[in-house]
Amino acid sequence: MTDLDYADRSDFEDADRGFIAALAPAVVRAEDGRVIWDGDAYAFLDEECPDTAHPSLWRQSQLCNKQGLFEVTAGIYQVRNLDLSNMTLVEGDTGVIVIDPLISAETAAAALALYREHRGDRPVTGLIYTHSHGDHFGGSRGILPHGHAPVPVIAPARFLEHAVAENVYAGGAMTRRAVYMYGAELAKGPAGHIGAGLGMTTSKGTVTLVPPTLDVTRTGQEETVDGVRIVFQMTPDTEAPSEMNFYFPDRRALCMAENATHNMHNILTLRGAMVRDTRIWAHYLGETISLFGDKAEVAFASHHWPTWGQDRIVEHLSGQRDMWAYLHDQTLRMANQGLTGLEIAERMELPPAIARRWANRGYYGSVSHNAKAIYQRYMGWFDGNPAHLWEHPPVEQAKRFAADYGGVPALVAKGEEYAASGDLRFAATLLGHAVFAAPDDTAAKNALATVYEKLGYGAENGPWRNFYLMGAQELRGTIAHTPLDTTNPEMAMALTVDMLIDSLAIRIDGPRAWDLTLTMTWNVTDEGRTWHLLLSNGALTYRSAETTPETGGPVKAADLTLTLTKPQLLGVLAGGGLEGVQVEGDTRVFATLVGLLDTPDSDFAIVTP
């Protein structure tokens, strides 16, 4: 293991630099009184690291837990640790420009209020989204409430498409797994939740979305907002499919979005996501150095704390660039030698000069799961071994393991034997089979929970710890609920009609629909387009065209035709009925379609069948 210099306090000095004031008490509530953020719950991190936490992760959590309003440089401020992400505020001629308004409207409003308390009641004169992940736009209505005077809302090209698509296609499963990844439902304490590496945890308030009014489409694009000049660098398909860095030439300040934070990031998050491109990520970091490395005096990001000084900024960006390039290239080198993703992850080791840098430690991503993700991006799920081509699913595998070990009690005993010998990884494998073979076996669940707790306590990676401890909690009978609701009307309005149809298609219970055929036409008047929907062979497909007298309907009349506005369509899909909608044909067709929709389970089990 690479020696880490715990005597190096430069990160703590940077994290404290520019401190103005903290929110006290650090508790944010929703309108109904629910606590959606409790920063005071982490006061225990002031103590020495206990034996229930990895000392490196404990150190990172101490840094992330520094809360309040900070001055980055003249006219630029950050509010940190009132959510998983940072809010940055840039003062202009008449007001303040907000960068990344956190996850929830409530925490965003609290952060803005803290800024105004100490910098004056400046109006918001612009809003910038660095990228398309929810922790960077969800609090937008806390900054620009309904009725606020219009201001520029700037985002990278295709931001809206990617921001809402993530919540449509696999959003249910990803949101559920995020509960385990961020550990928001774990008790805060030395034996429980101590952070997520990228920040402490996620807030649990109201997710909103104010649509952008200005797209950034190219590197070098320059905009002036409230007298503040901003030069943009497009970085698509890095940490998010739609992302950008930008530079403030008059402040000599560089915003790195989430492309260079103070930890190793994820190539594939444990909650699930599209696999990111380490090759292009490294390329864009090199481009950032070329564009701004000899100009910037401070670099800040959407998480963690800033870095000051040209030499230190270049060193930081170079360290992250080389980390991604090394992981990418060495994964493919070993893949081309015939190693699988699992084997590569076991062999992969970063060069000491990269690994010993605190900003490259695996607090959020990890060498292990990032190497597997790079392999997956290029090679897919199959490792080439035909034994893995048609394996039994988990329950069937578990039954056979139990039978071969002489029953579930014997399997549990063998798992506990491996745990006692220190082989917690194989103990988890055997005990996991025991739980899937006999889900009601308390001894098996308790034994696996104990192993998961030990694995969690030893994890340097925050999400790994959270997954292990959340898994242990589930095994002991406490099922965490998914508290974050991303289905508000504003998010729905941001969906295209194509996305709305896709959201229906992925909910069709295919086997029940095998023998049904139906057609619908939606004339969406305010979109000026007509959508023709077809359900056949269990699949809902569609095509669309501009609505004209010639293309207003299909050659063959549909079973049901609806002429309506997009808000009316949203109301119909939400169960509001067809009142006010122009209807031609059999309304039972729509009821039939709705009757075929599966209801997602927002609280499905993760570590039990």
Image: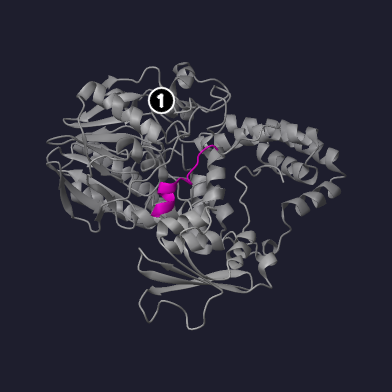
Determine if residue 287 is in view.
no
**Residue type at tag 1:** Asn
Viewer-nearest residue: 498 or 403: 498
The secondary structure type at the circle numbered 1 is: loop
Q: Residue furthest right?
A: 406
Crowd class of label 1 (few under 14; some 14 to 19; many from 20; radius 10 Å): many
Determine if residue 486 is in view.
yes
Q: Is residue 576 above or below residue 482?
A: below
Residue stretch rendered in magenta on the structure: 483-494
Q: Which residue is at 21% across, 33% downward?
A: 123
Q: Which residue is at 47% across, 26% downward?
A: 58
Residue 320, position in %: x, y? 35, 45
Horizontal side, residue 548 vs residue 516: left or right: left
Q: Is residue 444 magenta?
A: no
Mark 1 sits on what residue?
Answer: 65
Q: Is residue 464 above or below residue 510?
A: above
Horizontal side, residue 421 vs residue 139: left or right: right
Residue 154, position in %: x, y? 26, 49
Residue 331, position in %: x, y? 47, 56
